[in-house]
Protein backbone atom coordinates (compact mmCIF):
# COMPACT_ATOMS: atom_id res chain seq x y z
CA UNK A 1 0.00 0.00 0.00
CA UNK A 2 3.06 2.31 0.06
CA UNK A 3 2.43 5.56 -1.75
CA UNK A 4 -1.33 4.96 -1.88
CA UNK A 5 -3.57 7.92 -1.07
CA UNK A 6 -4.61 6.43 2.30
CA UNK A 7 -5.96 9.22 4.48
CA UNK A 8 -4.28 8.74 7.86
CA UNK A 9 -4.75 10.73 11.08
CA UNK A 10 -2.13 10.53 13.83
CA UNK A 11 -3.48 11.81 17.17
CA UNK A 12 -0.73 13.02 19.52
CA UNK A 13 2.61 14.62 18.65
CA UNK A 14 4.78 13.01 21.32
CA UNK A 15 7.63 10.59 20.54
CA UNK A 16 5.28 7.90 19.18
CA UNK A 17 3.09 10.19 17.05
CA UNK A 18 5.99 12.09 15.49
CA UNK A 19 7.97 8.90 14.86
CA UNK A 20 4.93 7.31 13.21
CA UNK A 21 4.45 10.42 11.06
CA UNK A 22 8.13 10.28 10.07
CA UNK A 23 8.00 6.56 9.20
CA UNK A 24 4.77 6.97 7.20
CA UNK A 25 6.19 9.90 5.24
CA UNK A 26 9.27 7.83 4.39
CA UNK A 27 6.89 5.13 3.12
CA UNK A 28 5.09 7.61 0.88
CA UNK A 29 2.05 8.43 3.04
CA UNK A 30 1.06 11.96 4.03
CA UNK A 31 -0.59 11.68 7.46
CA UNK A 32 -2.33 14.52 9.29
CA UNK A 33 -0.98 14.97 12.84
CA UNK A 34 -2.98 16.62 15.62
CA UNK A 35 -1.85 17.59 19.11
CA UNK A 36 -4.04 18.89 21.89
CA UNK A 37 -1.38 21.13 23.45
CA UNK A 38 -0.28 24.43 21.92
CA UNK A 39 3.21 24.54 20.37
CA UNK A 40 5.94 25.27 22.88
CA UNK A 41 8.97 23.95 24.61
CA UNK A 42 8.76 20.74 26.56
CA UNK A 43 9.65 20.77 30.25
CA UNK A 44 13.37 20.49 30.96
CA UNK A 45 13.67 16.70 31.30
CA UNK A 46 16.31 14.19 30.34
CA UNK A 47 15.87 10.93 28.51
CA UNK A 48 18.09 7.86 28.40
CA UNK A 49 17.89 5.90 25.14
CA UNK A 50 19.25 2.32 25.11
CA UNK A 51 20.81 0.92 21.93
CA UNK A 52 17.61 -0.30 20.30
CA UNK A 53 16.37 3.31 20.22
CA UNK A 54 19.49 4.23 18.21
CA UNK A 55 18.76 1.39 15.80
CA UNK A 56 15.16 2.57 15.30
CA UNK A 57 16.38 6.16 14.79
CA UNK A 58 18.76 4.83 12.14
CA UNK A 59 15.85 3.07 10.42
CA UNK A 60 13.99 6.39 10.49
CA UNK A 61 17.08 8.02 8.97
CA UNK A 62 17.35 10.31 12.00
CA UNK A 63 20.61 9.03 13.47
CA UNK A 64 22.54 11.88 11.83
CA UNK A 65 20.60 14.71 13.50
CA UNK A 66 20.61 12.90 16.87
CA UNK A 67 24.36 12.14 16.86
CA UNK A 68 25.52 15.62 18.05
CA UNK A 69 22.95 15.69 20.86
CA UNK A 70 23.40 14.75 24.49
CA UNK A 71 26.07 12.24 25.39
CA UNK A 72 26.88 8.64 24.49
CA UNK A 73 26.72 6.45 27.61
CA UNK A 74 29.19 3.56 27.75
CA UNK A 75 28.62 1.99 31.17
CA UNK A 76 25.96 1.58 33.82
CA UNK A 77 27.24 1.63 37.40
CA UNK A 78 24.98 0.21 40.09
CA UNK A 79 25.93 1.31 43.63
CA UNK A 80 24.38 0.66 47.01
CA UNK A 81 22.86 3.54 48.96
CA UNK A 82 26.21 4.46 50.49
CA UNK A 83 27.80 4.74 47.06
CA UNK A 84 29.76 1.44 47.25
CA UNK A 85 29.90 -0.48 43.93
CA UNK A 86 27.50 -3.38 43.40
CA UNK A 87 27.93 -4.21 39.72
CA UNK A 88 28.22 -2.68 36.27
CA UNK A 89 27.08 -3.24 32.69
CA UNK A 90 29.35 -2.56 29.71
CA UNK A 91 26.81 -1.01 27.34
CA UNK A 92 29.17 -1.04 24.35
CA UNK A 93 29.43 -4.82 24.68
CA UNK A 94 25.77 -5.39 25.50
CA UNK A 95 24.46 -3.34 22.54
CA UNK A 96 27.31 -4.15 20.09
CA UNK A 97 25.95 -4.31 16.56
CA UNK A 98 22.63 -2.70 17.63
CA UNK A 99 23.36 0.91 18.49
CA UNK A 100 24.98 3.20 21.02
CA UNK A 101 23.21 4.27 24.21
CA UNK A 102 22.64 8.00 24.54
CA UNK A 103 21.24 10.41 27.10
CA UNK A 104 19.89 13.79 26.03
CA UNK A 105 17.21 16.36 26.71
CA UNK A 106 13.74 15.14 25.75
CA UNK A 107 13.10 18.42 23.96
CA UNK A 108 16.14 17.80 21.73
CA UNK A 109 14.79 14.45 20.54
CA UNK A 110 11.37 16.01 20.10
CA UNK A 111 12.78 18.72 17.82
CA UNK A 112 14.51 16.13 15.62
CA UNK A 113 11.32 14.07 15.36
CA UNK A 114 9.21 17.13 14.61
CA UNK A 115 11.49 18.14 11.73
CA UNK A 116 11.55 14.53 10.55
CA UNK A 117 7.76 14.41 10.57
CA UNK A 118 7.62 17.38 8.21
CA UNK A 119 6.86 19.92 10.95
CA UNK A 120 3.16 20.17 10.15
CA UNK A 121 1.27 19.47 13.38
CA UNK A 122 -2.22 20.83 13.96
CA UNK A 123 -2.07 22.11 17.53
CA UNK A 124 -5.08 22.55 19.77
CA UNK A 125 -7.01 19.94 17.76
CA UNK A 126 -8.66 17.34 19.95
CA UNK A 127 -10.85 14.52 18.75
CA UNK A 128 -14.34 14.60 20.29
CA UNK A 129 -15.88 11.52 18.65
CA UNK A 130 -14.98 8.71 16.31
CA UNK A 131 -17.36 6.62 14.27
CA UNK A 132 -16.10 3.20 13.17
CA UNK A 133 -17.18 2.78 9.54
CA UNK A 134 -16.84 -0.44 7.50
CA UNK A 135 -13.85 0.93 5.53
CA UNK A 136 -12.76 3.94 7.55
CA UNK A 137 -13.26 6.20 10.56
CA UNK A 138 -15.43 9.30 10.89
CA UNK A 139 -13.64 11.82 13.11
CA UNK A 140 -15.29 14.83 14.78
CA UNK A 141 -12.98 17.40 16.37
CA UNK A 142 -13.86 19.54 19.39
CA UNK A 143 -14.30 22.61 17.13
CA UNK A 144 -17.15 20.74 15.40
CA UNK A 145 -15.31 20.02 12.14
CA UNK A 146 -15.58 16.45 10.83
CA UNK A 147 -13.44 14.40 8.41
CA UNK A 148 -13.32 10.82 7.26
CA UNK A 149 -10.04 8.88 7.42
CA UNK A 150 -8.96 5.44 6.22
CA UNK A 151 -6.90 4.93 9.38
CA UNK A 152 -6.68 6.69 12.75
CA UNK A 153 -3.58 6.13 14.89
CA UNK A 154 -3.93 6.96 18.58
CA UNK A 155 -0.49 8.09 19.79
CA UNK A 156 -1.97 10.13 22.61
CA UNK A 157 -0.09 8.67 25.54
CA UNK A 158 -1.02 6.67 28.63
CA UNK A 159 -4.30 8.55 29.16
CA UNK A 160 -5.32 8.07 25.51
CA UNK A 161 -8.72 9.41 24.66
CA UNK A 162 -8.64 7.51 21.33
CA UNK A 163 -8.40 4.31 23.39
CA UNK A 164 -11.58 5.26 25.21
CA UNK A 165 -13.42 6.51 22.10
CA UNK A 166 -12.63 3.25 20.24
CA UNK A 167 -13.57 1.13 23.30
CA UNK A 168 -10.12 -0.46 23.33
CA UNK A 169 -9.64 -0.27 27.08
CA UNK A 170 -10.09 1.80 30.16
CA UNK A 171 -7.73 3.89 32.17
CA UNK A 172 -4.07 3.24 32.89
CA UNK A 173 -3.08 1.58 36.20
CA UNK A 174 -0.69 3.14 38.70
CA UNK A 175 2.32 0.86 39.31
CA UNK A 176 2.93 2.10 42.84
CA UNK A 177 5.92 4.36 42.25
CA UNK A 178 6.33 8.08 42.72
CA UNK A 179 8.98 9.39 40.30
CA UNK A 180 11.03 12.57 40.34
CA UNK A 181 12.94 14.12 37.43
CA UNK A 182 15.24 17.10 37.24
CA UNK A 183 18.05 18.49 35.12
CA UNK A 184 21.01 19.74 37.13
CA UNK A 185 23.60 22.16 35.83
CA UNK A 186 26.91 22.70 37.59
CA UNK A 187 26.46 19.50 39.59
CA UNK A 188 29.17 17.00 40.56
CA UNK A 189 31.25 15.34 37.82
CA UNK A 190 29.43 12.12 36.80
CA UNK A 191 30.84 10.48 33.67
CA UNK A 192 28.45 7.56 33.20
CA UNK A 193 24.96 6.24 34.04
CA UNK A 194 25.08 5.83 37.83
CA UNK A 195 22.27 4.44 40.00
CA UNK A 196 22.20 4.13 43.79
CA UNK A 197 19.84 1.40 44.91
CA UNK A 198 18.21 1.73 48.31
CA UNK A 199 15.20 -0.10 49.64
CA UNK A 200 11.98 0.86 47.84
CA UNK A 201 13.82 3.90 46.52
CA UNK A 202 16.59 4.65 44.04
CA UNK A 203 18.50 7.62 42.66
CA UNK A 204 19.85 7.76 39.10
CA UNK A 205 22.21 10.34 37.62
CA UNK A 206 23.08 10.38 33.91
CA UNK A 207 25.24 12.96 32.08
CA UNK A 208 23.42 14.50 29.12
CA UNK A 209 26.24 16.62 27.72
CA UNK A 210 27.34 20.24 28.23
CA UNK A 211 27.91 19.58 31.94
CA UNK A 212 24.25 18.80 32.58
CA UNK A 213 22.94 15.83 34.56
CA UNK A 214 19.62 14.07 34.14
CA UNK A 215 18.43 13.02 37.60
CA UNK A 216 15.70 10.48 38.17
CA UNK A 217 14.59 9.21 41.55
CA UNK A 218 11.78 6.97 42.64
CA UNK A 219 10.13 5.65 45.76
CA UNK A 220 7.30 3.28 46.47
CA UNK A 221 4.05 5.21 46.82
CA UNK A 222 0.96 6.48 45.09
CA UNK A 223 0.72 10.16 45.99
CA UNK A 224 3.17 12.82 44.77
CA UNK A 225 4.34 15.09 47.59
CA UNK A 226 3.44 18.77 47.60
CA UNK A 227 7.11 19.81 47.85
CA UNK A 228 9.17 17.38 45.74
CA UNK A 229 12.53 19.07 46.42
CA UNK A 230 12.00 18.82 50.19
CA UNK A 231 10.87 15.22 49.85
CA UNK A 232 13.94 14.27 47.80
CA UNK A 233 16.25 15.90 50.34
CA UNK A 234 14.51 14.02 53.14
CA UNK A 235 14.37 10.66 51.35
CA UNK A 236 17.95 10.57 50.08
CA UNK A 237 19.64 12.44 52.90
CA UNK A 238 21.83 9.46 53.88
CA UNK A 239 22.80 8.45 50.33
CA UNK A 240 26.41 8.63 49.23
CA UNK A 241 28.18 8.95 45.86
CA UNK A 242 27.11 12.03 43.89
CA UNK A 243 23.71 12.28 45.61
CA UNK A 244 24.48 14.88 48.33
CA UNK A 245 25.93 17.33 45.77
CA UNK A 246 23.07 16.73 43.35
CA UNK A 247 20.53 17.37 46.12
CA UNK A 248 22.25 20.70 46.82
CA UNK A 249 21.85 21.78 43.18
CA UNK A 250 18.18 20.87 42.78
CA UNK A 251 15.69 23.62 42.18
CA UNK A 252 12.93 22.51 39.74
CA UNK A 253 11.76 18.93 40.11
CA UNK A 254 8.97 17.27 38.12
CA UNK A 255 7.07 14.68 40.10
CA UNK A 256 4.45 12.13 39.07
CA UNK A 257 3.35 8.54 39.41
CA UNK A 258 4.21 5.74 37.00
CA UNK A 259 1.48 3.97 35.07
CA UNK A 260 0.97 0.85 33.06
CA UNK A 261 -1.35 0.18 30.13
CA UNK A 262 -2.17 -3.43 29.34
CA UNK A 263 -4.71 -4.13 26.60
CA UNK A 264 -6.24 -7.24 25.10
CA UNK A 265 -6.06 -5.68 21.64
CA UNK A 266 -4.51 -2.60 20.08
CA UNK A 267 -6.92 -1.94 17.22
CA UNK A 268 -10.60 -1.94 16.47
CA UNK A 269 -11.80 -1.43 12.92
CA UNK A 270 -9.45 1.15 11.43
CA UNK A 271 -8.32 2.65 14.78
CA UNK A 272 -4.91 1.61 16.09
CA UNK A 273 -3.04 2.52 19.28
CA UNK A 274 0.76 2.95 19.40
CA UNK A 275 3.34 3.98 22.02
CA UNK A 276 2.25 4.55 25.60
CA UNK A 277 -1.42 4.60 24.55
CA UNK A 278 -1.06 0.86 23.83
CA UNK A 279 1.68 -0.39 26.16
CA UNK A 280 2.95 2.10 28.75
CA UNK A 281 5.09 0.66 31.54
CA UNK A 282 7.00 2.12 34.47
CA UNK A 283 10.21 3.63 33.02
CA UNK A 284 12.55 1.31 34.96
CA UNK A 285 14.23 -0.06 31.79
CA UNK A 286 14.03 3.28 29.92
CA UNK A 287 12.35 1.55 27.00
CA UNK A 288 9.34 3.85 26.42
CA UNK A 289 10.92 5.93 23.66
CA UNK A 290 12.60 2.91 22.06
CA UNK A 291 9.30 1.02 21.97
CA UNK A 292 7.55 4.04 20.42
CA UNK A 293 10.27 4.40 17.76
CA UNK A 294 10.17 0.67 16.99
CA UNK A 295 6.37 0.83 16.74
CA UNK A 296 6.74 3.48 14.04
CA UNK A 297 9.22 1.46 11.99
CA UNK A 298 7.14 -1.72 12.13
CA UNK A 299 3.85 0.06 11.40
CA UNK A 300 5.22 1.68 8.25
CA UNK A 301 6.68 -1.65 7.11
CA UNK A 302 3.36 -3.41 7.77
CA UNK A 303 1.33 -0.83 5.87
CA UNK A 304 3.77 -0.96 2.97
CA UNK A 305 3.91 -4.73 2.59
CA UNK A 306 0.41 -5.95 3.58
CA UNK A 307 -2.34 -6.23 1.01
CA UNK A 308 -4.93 -4.36 3.10
CA UNK A 309 -5.15 -2.06 6.12
CA UNK A 310 -6.69 -4.88 8.16
CA UNK A 311 -3.86 -7.28 7.27
CA UNK A 312 -1.33 -4.56 8.10
CA UNK A 313 -2.83 -3.95 11.56
CA UNK A 314 -2.87 -7.68 12.32
CA UNK A 315 0.73 -8.06 11.16
CA UNK A 316 1.78 -4.99 13.14
CA UNK A 317 0.25 -6.18 16.40
CA UNK A 318 1.63 -9.68 16.12
CA UNK A 319 5.16 -8.35 15.48
CA UNK A 320 5.07 -5.76 18.30
CA UNK A 321 3.39 -7.80 21.04
CA UNK A 322 6.36 -10.03 22.01
CA UNK A 323 8.77 -7.11 22.46
CA UNK A 324 6.41 -4.85 24.39
CA UNK A 325 5.32 -7.81 26.56
CA UNK A 326 8.99 -8.55 27.26
CA UNK A 327 9.57 -4.96 28.37
CA UNK A 328 6.50 -5.02 30.61
CA UNK A 329 7.45 -8.35 32.21
CA UNK A 330 11.12 -7.47 32.76
CA UNK A 331 10.06 -4.09 34.16
CA UNK A 332 7.82 -5.86 36.64
CA UNK A 333 10.64 -8.31 37.49
CA UNK A 334 13.07 -5.50 38.17
CA UNK A 335 10.55 -3.51 40.18
CA UNK A 336 9.80 -6.53 42.38
CA UNK A 337 13.45 -6.59 43.50
CA UNK A 338 12.90 -3.15 45.01
CA UNK A 339 11.10 -4.79 47.92
CA UNK A 340 13.98 -7.16 48.70
CA UNK A 341 15.99 -5.88 51.69
CA UNK A 342 19.46 -4.68 50.60
CA UNK A 343 21.09 -7.15 53.01
CA UNK A 344 19.68 -9.98 50.86
CA UNK A 345 19.77 -8.28 47.46
CA UNK A 346 23.18 -6.66 47.43
CA UNK A 347 25.34 -9.82 47.77
CA UNK A 348 23.48 -11.26 44.75
CA UNK A 349 24.05 -8.08 42.76
CA UNK A 350 27.74 -8.02 43.70
CA UNK A 351 28.07 -11.57 42.39
CA UNK A 352 26.05 -11.45 39.18
CA UNK A 353 24.18 -8.13 38.99
CA UNK A 354 25.80 -7.18 35.69
CA UNK A 355 24.57 -10.38 34.04
CA UNK A 356 21.09 -10.06 35.60
CA UNK A 357 20.60 -6.44 34.50
CA UNK A 358 22.05 -7.04 31.03
CA UNK A 359 19.73 -10.02 30.52
CA UNK A 360 16.70 -7.76 30.94
CA UNK A 361 17.41 -6.47 27.41
CA UNK A 362 18.11 -9.86 25.76
CA UNK A 363 15.10 -10.05 23.46
CA UNK A 364 15.51 -6.40 22.44
CA UNK A 365 18.99 -7.03 21.05
CA UNK A 366 17.46 -9.11 18.27
CA UNK A 367 15.86 -7.71 15.11
CA UNK A 368 12.41 -6.05 15.21
C1 LIG B 1 9.27 9.73 34.93
C2 LIG B 1 9.46 9.11 33.58
C3 LIG B 1 10.74 8.93 33.07
C4 LIG B 1 10.92 8.35 31.83
N1 LIG B 1 12.18 8.17 31.37
C5 LIG B 1 12.36 7.59 30.17
C6 LIG B 1 13.67 7.40 29.65
O1 LIG B 1 14.68 7.79 30.26
N2 LIG B 1 13.79 6.78 28.45
C7 LIG B 1 12.71 6.35 27.74
O2 LIG B 1 12.86 5.78 26.65
N3 LIG B 1 11.47 6.52 28.22
C8 LIG B 1 11.27 7.14 29.40
N4 LIG B 1 10.01 7.32 29.85
C9 LIG B 1 8.88 6.84 29.05
C10 LIG B 1 8.62 7.74 27.86
O3 LIG B 1 8.53 9.09 28.31
C11 LIG B 1 7.32 7.36 27.16
O4 LIG B 1 7.27 5.98 26.96
C12 LIG B 1 7.21 8.07 25.83
O5 LIG B 1 7.22 9.46 26.03
C13 LIG B 1 5.92 7.65 25.15
O6 LIG B 1 5.67 8.47 24.08
P1 LIG B 1 4.19 8.62 23.52
O7 LIG B 1 4.33 9.52 22.34
O8 LIG B 1 3.56 7.28 23.34
O9 LIG B 1 3.35 9.32 24.65
P2 LIG B 1 3.47 10.80 25.24
O10 LIG B 1 4.89 11.18 25.38
O11 LIG B 1 2.60 10.83 26.44
O12 LIG B 1 2.86 11.74 24.10
C14 LIG B 1 1.47 11.80 23.85
C15 LIG B 1 1.16 13.08 23.10
O13 LIG B 1 -0.23 13.09 22.80
C16 LIG B 1 -0.79 14.34 23.19
N5 LIG B 1 -2.20 14.11 23.50
C17 LIG B 1 -2.72 13.54 24.61
N6 LIG B 1 -4.07 13.46 24.50
C18 LIG B 1 -4.38 13.98 23.28
C19 LIG B 1 -5.60 14.17 22.59
N7 LIG B 1 -6.75 13.81 23.14
N8 LIG B 1 -5.59 14.72 21.36
C20 LIG B 1 -4.38 15.11 20.80
N9 LIG B 1 -3.20 14.96 21.41
C21 LIG B 1 -3.20 14.39 22.64
C22 LIG B 1 0.03 14.76 24.40
O14 LIG B 1 -0.06 16.15 24.62
C23 LIG B 1 1.42 14.32 23.96
O15 LIG B 1 2.05 15.29 23.17
C24 LIG B 1 9.80 7.92 31.08
C25 LIG B 1 8.52 8.12 31.57
C26 LIG B 1 8.35 8.70 32.81
C27 LIG B 1 6.94 8.88 33.33
Image (cartoon, rainbow, N blue to C red):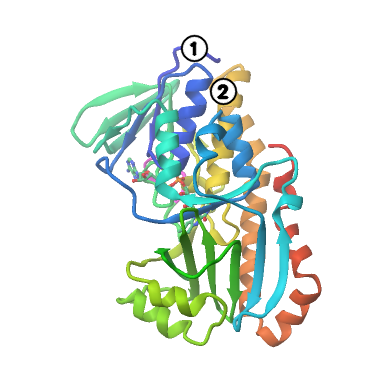
Q: Position of residue 212 (x, y in %)?
A: 45, 59
**Number of numbered markers:** 2
Query: Circle 1 is placed at which residue position?
Result: 4
Q: Quarter of the image containing the N terminus?
A: top right
Are the two marked residues, 1 and 2, in contact with CB atoms closer than 8 angstroms? no
Q: Is residue 305 above or below residue 206?
A: above
For label 1, the SS is loop
Q: Earlier in the sequence, mark 1 or mark 2?
A: 1
| Label 1 crowd bin: few (<14), some (14–19), many (20+), radius 10 Å | few
For label 2, the SS is helix
Q: Is residue 66 left or right of residue 117?
A: right
Along the line of sight, the residue nearer the viewer: 137 or 156: 156
User: Is residue 176 shown to the viewer in this render?
Assistant: no
Which of the 4 quarters of the picture holds residue 152? top left
Q: Is residue 302 left or right of residue 148?
A: right
Magenta segment main secondary structure: loop
The residue segment tinted magenta is 164-169
Along the line of sight, the residue nearer the viewer: 165 or 11: 11
The residue located at (44%, 12%) in the rendering is: 5
| Label 2 crowd bin: few (<14), some (14–19), many (20+), radius 10 Å | many
Q: Is residue 107 above or below residue 216?
A: above
Q: Position of residue 254 (x, y in %)?
A: 36, 64
User: Is residue 194 shown to the viewer in this render?
Assistant: yes
The residue located at (54%, 83%) in the rendering is: 239
Query: Circle 2 is placed at which residue position?
Result: 303
The residue located at (57%, 62%) in the rendering is: 284
Along the line of sight, the residue nearer the viewer: 86 or 134: 86
Residue 149 belongs to the span the image colors magenta: no
Farthest residue to the top: give it: 4
Distance CA(mark 1)–CA(mark 2): 10 Å
Amino acid sequence: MGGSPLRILVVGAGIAGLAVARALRMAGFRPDVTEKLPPGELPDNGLYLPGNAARALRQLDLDGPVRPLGQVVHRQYFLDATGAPLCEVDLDVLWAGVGECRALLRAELHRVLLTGAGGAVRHGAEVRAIDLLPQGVGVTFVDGSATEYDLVIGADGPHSSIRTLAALGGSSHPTGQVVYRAVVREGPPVAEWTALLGQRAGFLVVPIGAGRLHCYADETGTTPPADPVARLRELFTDYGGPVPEVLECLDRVHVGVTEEVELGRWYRGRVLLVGDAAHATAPTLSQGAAMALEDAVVLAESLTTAGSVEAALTAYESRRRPRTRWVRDRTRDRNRTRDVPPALRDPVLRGRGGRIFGAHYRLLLGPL
